[in-house]
Image (tube, rainbow, N blue to C red):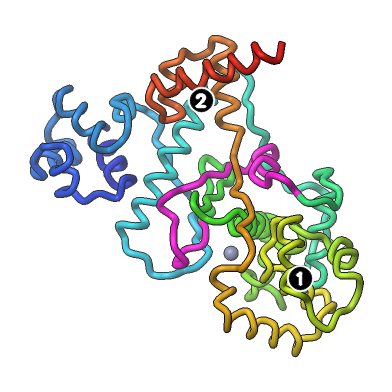
Amino acid sequence: MIGDRIKQARQAAGLSLRALAEQAGISAMAISKYENNKATPSSRVLLALARALGVRVEYFFRQAQVQLEEVEYRKHSKLPKRLLAQIEGDVKEQVERFLELEEYLPNRPMQTFEVPEGLPGRVDEFADIEVVARKLRDAWELGANPIPELTDTLEERGILVFQSEALHGDRFDGLAAHVNGVPIVVVGASWPGDRQRFTLAHELGHLILKDRLGPALKEHEETAANRFAGAFLVPESEVHKELGGPRKRLEPHELCVLKNAYGLSMGGWLHRARDLDLLPQTNYVSMVRFFRKRGWHKKEPCDDYPRERPQVFMQLVYHALAEDLIGESKAAELLRMPLAEFHAQRNMERADEAVNQ
Ligand SMILES: [Zn+2]
C-alpha cells in the first residue's frame, strides 16, 4: 500500500510528520491520512513528498515488501525508537533496490550463503576459534594475506552488505539480520574502514559460530565473535610473523604500519597479541592504559584505514544496462542518482574506455 511506503520513506529519512509537512508544504494531518491509507495522495502531492524525502515517485509504487528478520544489534543499547526506525527504513529501502535489480537479471547473481564443510563442529575454547577462522579462509581460498575488500569477499559468498548514514557515533555498532533467508550486515557509511571491517568480520563470526559454541563459550558469544573477527582479519600465522614472537611491548608506530597493512585497528592488534600469548597480560593492560590516557581508544593517532567501497551493486546495474535489461532511467533510479548525474557518470566511463583503446 502506498501509505506504508510513504511512512517507510519518512522514517528512513529520520523525519517526524511535522518535519516532513514543513519540507513538503503539505499538512501533517494530510500526511498522516496518506500514511494510514485513509486518503489517496494526488500525483502533485506525491511529487512533493518524493522531493522532500529524497526518493523517486516510483518508490511509492514499488511492490517488494521487505521484512528484516532476526534483527540483531551488536550493542544492545537503548536507542530512540525513531532512530531504529530510520536505520531499518534505510536498510529496507536498499534491500528492495537490490531485490528489484535481481529481478531484471536472468541469472541470479547472488550465491546462496553456506557455511563450508570441514570446519570444527564444536568450539570449547577461544583458541579453537583460530582454527575455525583459518579453515574458513582455506575453504574460501583467501590464503593468509590481508583481505583487500571485505565487503566484496562477503557478497561473493552470499552475505549482503549495506552501509547506512543512519549508523553513526559510538552508540551503535552494527546490525545483522536476514531478508528472505539471506544474511545481511549493515555498517556505518561514515565509519573508518577498520571499524567497518571489524564489524563485518564480527557478524560473519556470529554466522559461522552460531551452532558451534560449547557450553563454556555459549554465554560469551560476543567475545567469541570478536576473537573470530581478529583471527579472520589477521590469521595466527601472520601475527607471529609480523610480531616476530613473544614481545614485551609494541611500538605505536609499529601498530600503525600493521593497521595499514591489514585493516585491523591498533587496538585490534594489541588484542591479537594478547590473545595469542605474544604479549603478557600485565603489559597488555599497561599499553591499553597508555592508549586511553592519550584518547587513542577513541581516535587512533595514525590515519584511518580507507573505507570499504562496495562494488557489486553498481557493477550489476551496469551489467543490466549493458545487456539492455534496464534503461538509463531505471539504472539511475536503482542507484538513487539523478538521471543527469548518472548519464554523466556513464559517459565519463565510456570516455575512459575510448582512451584506452
Ligand atoms: Zn555480536
What element does badge 1 sit on?
A: helix
Q: Is residue 151 magenta?
A: yes
Q: For the magenta stretch, what is the residue range?
A: 147-174
Q: Kindly identify the residue that appears in the image at 46 percent across and 63 percent down.
A: 172
In the figure, is residue 143 to the left or right of 349? right
Residue 102 place in picture, x, y as percent: 54, 26
Q: Residue furthest bottom?
A: 282
Q: How far across and down, in percent of the image, does residue 139 sit?
A: 83, 46
Q: Residues within 10 Å of mark 2 (few under 14, many from 20)?
A: many
Instruction: Tell me the amino acid under the disc marked 1.
Output: Arg
Q: Quadrant of ligand 1?
A: bottom right
Q: Residues within 10 Å of mark 1 (few under 14, many from 20)?
A: many
- The residue depicted at 65 percent of the width and 15 percent of the height is 353
Q: How many marks?
A: 2
Residue sitting at 20 percent across and 28 percent down? 46
Q: Which residue is mark 1?
A: 272
Compared to residue 282, the image places residue 292 above or below, namely above
Residue at 50% across, 46% down: 163
Residue on which disc 2 sits: 101
Distance of label 1 from label 2 (alpha carbons)? 40 Å
Residue 147: give x, y in percent of width and height. 75, 48
Residue 186 forms part of the magenta stretch:
no
Q: Nearer the viewer, residue 264 or 7?
A: 264
